[in-house]
Amino acid sequence: LGKDSTENYVEVDDLEKVPQSEQKKWEKDQMASAVFKFGAKDAKSRDDYELLLEDQIEFIQALKLPGTKEKKEPQLTEVEKKIMDIEECKKSLPIFPFRDEFINAVRENQVLIIEGETGSGKTTQIPQYLHEAGFTEDSKKIGCTQPRRVAAMSVAARVAQEMRVKLGNEVGYAIRFEDCTSERTVIKYMTDGTLHREFLSEPDLQSYSVMIIDEAHERTLHTDILFGLVKDIARFRPDLKLLISSATLDAQKFSEFFDGAPIFRIPGRRFPVDIYYTKAPEADYIDACVVSVLQIHATQPLGDILVFLTGQEEIETCQELLTDRVRRLGSKVKELLILPVYANLPSDMQAKIFEPTPPGARKVVLATNIAETSLTIDNIIYVIDPGFAKQNHFNSRTGMESLMVVPISKASANQRAGRAGRVAAGKCFRLYTAWSYKHELEDNTVPEIQRINLGNAVLMLKALGINDLVHFDFLDPPPHETLVLALEQLYALGALNHHGELTKLGRRMAEFPVDPMMAKMILASEKYKCSEEIVSIGAMLSVNGAIFYRPKDKIIHADTARKNFNHPGGDHLSLLNVYNQWKDSDYSTQWCYENFIQYRSMKRARDVREQLVGLMQRVEIEMVSNVSETVDIRKSITAGYFYHIARLSKGGNYKTVKHNQSVTIHPNSALFEELPRWLLYHELVFTTKEFMRQVVEIESKWLLEVAPHYYKQKELEDPTNKKMPKTVGRSTRTE
Ligand code: CDP
Ligand code: MG
């Protein structure tokens, strides 16, 4: 049956073999029959479909598909078993047979490019091999950068476990606002942003003997800048070993950039993966994911499923839908473990995805892009790929930055498919058409440096004394206009003088591991005497997890609770309310529970706040509180975020001041029904339209006070300074 149900699918290899001339005919014949949804063509509604599915499951049970055979384990204690498992696991990795060859290559070359399929053991094994080979003698460390926080933490935890040490001792990690290392640390995983920042305090990386720039193919902004920085350092630190490690075929490019450094290839072990496409584009890919998971679960032999979604919200929705449907199917289906993984997931939950699936059951992992290359989950046989990812986009013409869900590239799609072929032959279900794959997806993902705001990066480089950015050694240079815009923005913020040199303010801003606008907001609180309030707001804004908890069965209670925190001045002040009240409750868990607030996010906000306060002391800003009114707090915010200003226009819509772009208040905002004339937004999020998330009401004249070189009186002229009347029909929340 498993075979029958897949016979109609179109395979990518077939697709590639089809000559152009026959493409049209081929599409007609083949694609029409490529029905992905088993029986879906007969189903008129979702209920129909579920009925079909139930029939199908009964049928399968009648066939009695074989489960996994239970192995007879020798009698060992749990700990012994675990150690044995780990030792065996290490030896089974593709990199293991090349251990000595690899160490020799490192000894003989200062710079080495490493290329190997995801899961070959690069991230977890290489630092250990180097440590065992003596590279950590003379109290020097091995550093390894990761583009993602979750990866840095989870990989460090794994390696600590493999080396049987406590995380934070010999093996540790450092991510923004969190340093889990100690004097004893010899293997240090960190985000690329963290290493970038470490250059400020240790420009020659003196405490490291080896630096590994891992997941280089991801081409994040920080990784790209690190390439230039480490290349430079390697010239005057001949004792420093530099490893550039990547999963895909960029190795040649890296080698050329690093003056022809040799490439060390770890032969891949990859089983074939059959690729299937949908017949027609999917209108609702979340639903399509749920349906596909259930189909696989019902029709395919055991083996775990990996689903790629774009973010926490989608993952939670998908998880709820799946849980609900599995429950309704009851004992008709085998056990299905549903496990999410995304950046803000607590680490004990993250650890769950690596636990082996119990015999006879199936695991489905709902993951963000993180599972594409940074994390390897064993035993994945099926991959479901809706073809989307969240990406930061910056429009240098309008100066607007927003987070958007965009189609992935062919390279990404193939990486995702590859996740299915690590342990056995696998299957990848693409929830888009073969035509889309071929004609609509770009070949490669555009490196971040070419599509995001460079303000932060430029400030950091200036702080490192690199003044001539045009001639900086970039692997791929950023667009000229983006660079110029970043310089202009930093100038407007007061971080650079008109020669493009760092000012005293700029130097202080660079101390903060936040974007320049937030750094400026924090520093401005000195003048407006409200540093206590501003750091709380800054900390709350930096927690990129949700603060408010909104369980489906208690939406009304949750929304009422949320409204109690609303401040008429705007969301920043509502967040401040939340923080202060939580503090008054003595940081109580119970309080969070009663008020539908996520305790974990609050705890993180408190940690972030503490770090920010520490940094404020370093730049000698006194902590003072301003409780009388909110004008000064809002002025401080404006001093940082004066680019993010929108003015009310017709019909309750907003237009950004400088570029006249249409933007809308997010329905979750305290000001959603208020419509003040002037608004400052924290960020733009593009979903159905461009939404402003976290808005605060301001007065236009403040702009002249905080950014006189950016705003002119004329563009801020405003005949009526009253609020617009509330529009009818906007009182129902849509989310
Ligand atoms: O870096 P690369 O993709 O080459 O591989 P890796 O991340 O070093 O992973 C090697 C192995 O370690 C895989 O089999 C993973 O499943 C395992 N691993 C794990 O069990 N837990 C982690 N947190 C990370 C890796
Ligand atoms: Mg890796």
Image: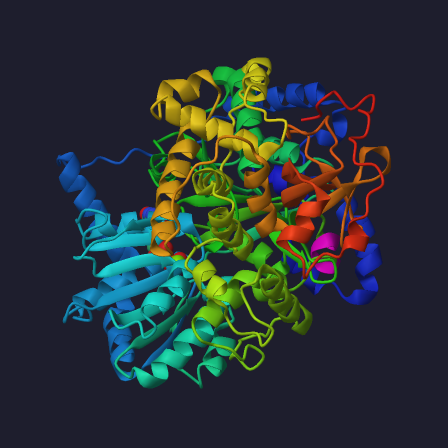
Q: Main secondary structure of the magenta part?
A: helix
Residue 182 located within the stretch drawn in magenta: no
**Residue at the image position 68 percent from the left and 70 percent from the top:** 481
Res. 403 visible in picture: yes
**Residue at the image position 51 percent from the left and 18 percent from the top:** 327
Residue 438 located within the stretch drawn in magenta: yes
- For the image, the number of numbered tags is 0
Q: Where in the figure is residue 366, as x and y percent of width and height?
A: 50, 38
Res. 275 visible in picture: no
Closer to us: 35 or 132: 132
Q: Where in the figure is residue 139, as x and y percent of width and height?
A: 16, 67
Q: Where in the figure is residue 471, as x and y percent of width and height?
A: 55, 82
Vertical arrangement, residue 350 with respect to residue 50, above or below: below
Q: Where in the figure is residue 181, as x and y percent of width and height?
A: 25, 53
**Residue at the image position 47 percent from the left and 18 percent from the top:** 595
Q: How is the image coloured?
A: rainbow
Closer to us: 303 or 399: 399
Vertical arrangement, residue 427 with respect to residue 210, above or below: above
Magenta segment:
435-439
Q: Quadrant of ligand 2?
A: bottom left
